[in-house]
Structure formats: C-alpha cells, structure tokens
Image (spheres, coloured by chain):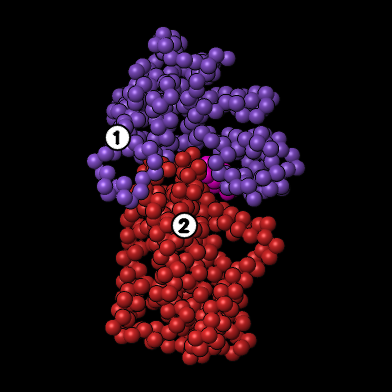
Chain colours: A purple, B red
Amino acid sequence: MKTNKMTIPTAVELINISKKYVVRHEKPTLVDQIFKKGRKKKFWALRNVNLIINKGERVGIVGRNGSGKTTLLKIVNGIARPTSGKVKTNGKVVSLIDLTAGFHPELTGEENIYLNAMLLKMDKKTTKKRFKAIIRFADIGSFIDAPLYTYSEGMKLRLGFSVAVHSNPDILILDEVMSVGDRDFQKKSFARIQEFYNRGKTIILTSHWESYIMENCDRVIWIDKGKIVMDGKTRSVLSKYKKSGSEWYIM
Amino acid sequence: MERLKNLKNIWHVDLLVAMTEKEIKARYKGAIFGFLWLLLNPVMQMLVIGVVFRYVTKTPIENYFVFLFAGLLPWNFFSYSTVKNTPMIVNERYLIKKAYFPREILIYALILANLFHLVITVLIFGIVLLLFGLLKVSILLPVAILWLLLLTTGTSLFFATWNVQFRDINFFVQAIIPLWFYATPIVYLLSFVPDNLKLLFYINPMTGIVEMFRSSLLGVDVTMANGLWLSLFSSIVIIVLGLVSFLKKSPYFDDWI
C-alpha cells in the first residue's frame, strides 16, 4: 500500500471505518433516556470498511436503500463522525447532496450566492472573482437583485448547482444528483462534471440509474448492509450487482 | 487542537461574517419600522415595567426609568441570544446535514448580530443620557459587555448542544428565562434583597453583569463588592461547561437531527 501511495496520490482513505446509530422511532425525551436506557436499539450503518480512492478516479457507489451509501459519503465529507476508524482526505471535499441547503428566502440572489459559496468552503475573494461566471452559468438574468422567494424552484436549483460547480473542489461528491433544471441545463451540468474529470478531479457518486453510473464511473463499489461486497471495474461489478436481483431504474 | 486550526481557514472567518450579516439583514426585512424595533422593544418594556413599579408599587429608586433601561439592555441581549440559540442546531438541521462547516459559526453569528444591535442601542441610550446630564460612563463598560458576551456564548453552546439530544431543553430554557429575569436585579436594587438570600443572587452570573453594566453607564455604586467574584466564578463554570459539551458532542450532531 505504501508503494501505491508514492506513485498515485490518494484522494480518500478510509481505515477500518464503522458507524453505529441508535435507532429511535420518536425523538427522545429526558424521561425516555432515564427510564428506557436498556431498550435502545443499535444499528451499524457501516462495519469495518476499508477503502482507498486515488486522485482522478470516478467512483460509483451502488447498493440498496439503507445499505450505507449516504453514511459513507457523509463520513468522507466530514458531516458525520465514524464510531471507530480513521478517515484521511487529501484536498477540498465538496458535496452536491442538496444544492439549496444554504439559501435564505429573504435575501437577494447575490447575497445568497455569497452565503452558499462560503458553506461550500469558498472565501469571499474567490467568490467575488467567480461571481459573474456563477450568474452566467445559472442563467437567472435580472433576478439577481430580487429576494430569493421570488425565484422559481428551477431557478433556485440552477443557482445552487452553479455555485457548487464554481467552488472548485478536489473531491466532488454527488449523492443522487442529476436531474437539475431543464434539459438544456442538464446538458450543461453534465458537461461541467465531465470537465472536472478531465482536470483530474476525483468524483464519488451514488445513483439508482444504471446508465448514469455506466457513463460516469471507471470503478464501482457495491455496498450491502454496511459492508463492501465488491469493488472493481464498472462493467464487472454492475453485472454481478444486477444478477443479485437488485433493482435499477432503467433510462 | 484540530478545531483551533480549523478556525484559521479564511473561509470560516468569511462565513462567520456573512452569517452575521445575514442575521442582521434578514431580521427586519419586511418590517415597516425596520431597525427602529431595536429601540422600540426595550422602550416598550421600560414603559410598562416602569409604570408598574414607579406608580403602582412606588419604588424608591431614583431616575427609575433610566435605571430600568440600563438593566434591560444586557438582559435582553442575554435572554434573546440564549432563547434563539437553544434550538439553533435543530432548526438548522438542513444545513448541518448537507454541508460541512464548523457548527459553532451558527451560534456565534447570532451572538455577534445581537452584539451589533446592543452596541447601537447603548450608543443611542448614551446620547440620551448625555442630554439629560446622567451619563457617567466608565472604563468598565467594555469589560461588562465582554463578560456578557462570554457568558451568553457559554449558555448558548451549552443549551444548543444538549437540545440536540434532549428536546426538553428548549422548553426548559423558555420556562426559566422569565424566572431568571426576576432573579436578577433589573427592576429592583440588589440592596433590597435580604442578607441571608444575597449569596443566591450572587451566584447568578447575570447579577454581576447587570450590576457592572449599569454602574459603568450611570456611575452608581456596585453594591455587591465581593459578590462580583462569585458571579464571575459561576460564569466561568457555565462557559467551560458549554465549551466542553459542544466540543465533545458537535461531531455527532448529524446522528441526532
């Protein structure tokens, strides 16, 4: 593993990662906590996962709902802390999990761009420099000075996507993101993701769409019940995954 | 150590500034009186409480309305910040679940926005006092504000952290804040409190802050002397508890919201 590290730089390294959640059916109250301590159910979302993703790889993660895909991405991103194990990331990680999370309805498009950019690890100076490009890509025209609640849902999504792709990440995480905006915008965003890849950025994505994974990934990791079932070339993993009876949305 | 290193990142500073600006700009958007609410709020409180204590219960305190206003300013900062920060992590769950950034920024931004408001109201109040010849400002004013700032950070971090796991905390805070108001010498003088109860009042960190704040604006004597150290001590305990809870629990916020 040491020699591998020397030749190809590692983007993400997960060492023996486990993540335990406490299952709750309702939000806990103080009384529950004190009197029902022994009745907590535990659930392992990930169990002893070891994984190395090299710089410039395009990795797809497949698995049924609840298999641990999103937990894995959250741990790479730093949003969730693993119960045990070690995470190493090399470079800026940006996640496009939900594009409009950082938006505030009362503020203008411009104010929101800055806020959202900083949530995606951009500083103010860089945002200012890329400001025009962000607006141009989002194609929202004169609405830029209007408060965000006057925007259509499509416009908000386009703005969010535009900010995210201009944040220039080293590692880009796409969790079920693909259908943003109309067909023209989808083409544009697809081209943008391709461009990331061509510049040697690392991309990690999940999708339920077989063709999306096929087109965008060189390597696929199949996860089930918190463990890696198979890890290898896209075609071979996908065919095994299909044979296991897992469902795909066909495009 | 890792966290201290974190805050050095330029985008964290920029984010804190942007979130503070957002908080200031967004609060009065769509309100006709806008920033005037900053003053209207404590003035209305002062009038109602003032009339009750001045004319109904006939308090012997001189310049009662001014005395009251000087106590309401730090109290409002404290109560408003604490009440709004307690459910902050839960309310901002969509942000926390989707983006990685230091979670304390949410809490600090609200406190800084309120500090901005406090400074403006203190300046306006200071001008009014000057016109009436009542202003006797001392060097202790910034010390009192700093103390207030740190205590509020402590309570905010503490309650916000524990509210993630136990939503009862929010109800608890809403219940104790009005009681806490009466346990702090805002509408009355500390010297009215019977001697055998004084110790309890000194332990309340807001007692020291309100006393110091008021005396540094109006030049009245601090009547608690050594009691001030007790208030300071309990403030430090609260701040440490807040910080330790937050540092320990914040990496796991995503698990609970």
Q: Which mark is residue A119?
A: none
Kind of residue sitting beneath label 2: Asn
Of B240 and A136, which appears nearest the observer?
B240
Neighbor class of circle 1 (other Cα within 10 Å; few <14, some 14-19, many 20+) is: few
CA separation in Å, label 1 and label 2:
30 Å
- Horizontal side of B36 relative to A30 (left or right) equals right
Residue B224, x across and y down, in percent: 36, 83
Q: Main secondary structure of the magenta part?
A: helix
Residue at x 58%, y 14% (from the top left corner) = A251
Task: Report whether residue B209 is seen.
Answer: no
Neighbor class of circle 2 (other Cα within 10 Å; few <14, some 14-19, many 20+) is: many
Quadrant in which residue B126 is drawn: bottom right
On what subunit does the disc labeled 1 rest?
A
Residue B124, x across and y down, in percent: 61, 76
Of A187 and B156, which appears nearest the observer?
B156
Kind of residue sitting beneath label 1: Lys
Residue at numbered disc 2: B85
Region of the chain picked out in magenta, as a range? A117-126
A48 shown above or below B183: above
Residue A116, x across and y down, in percent: 57, 44
- Horizontal side of B248 relative to A92 (left or right) equals left
Q: Nearer the viewer, mark 1 or mark 2?
A: 1
Residue at numbered disc 1: A42
Q: Secondary structure at mark 1?
A: strand
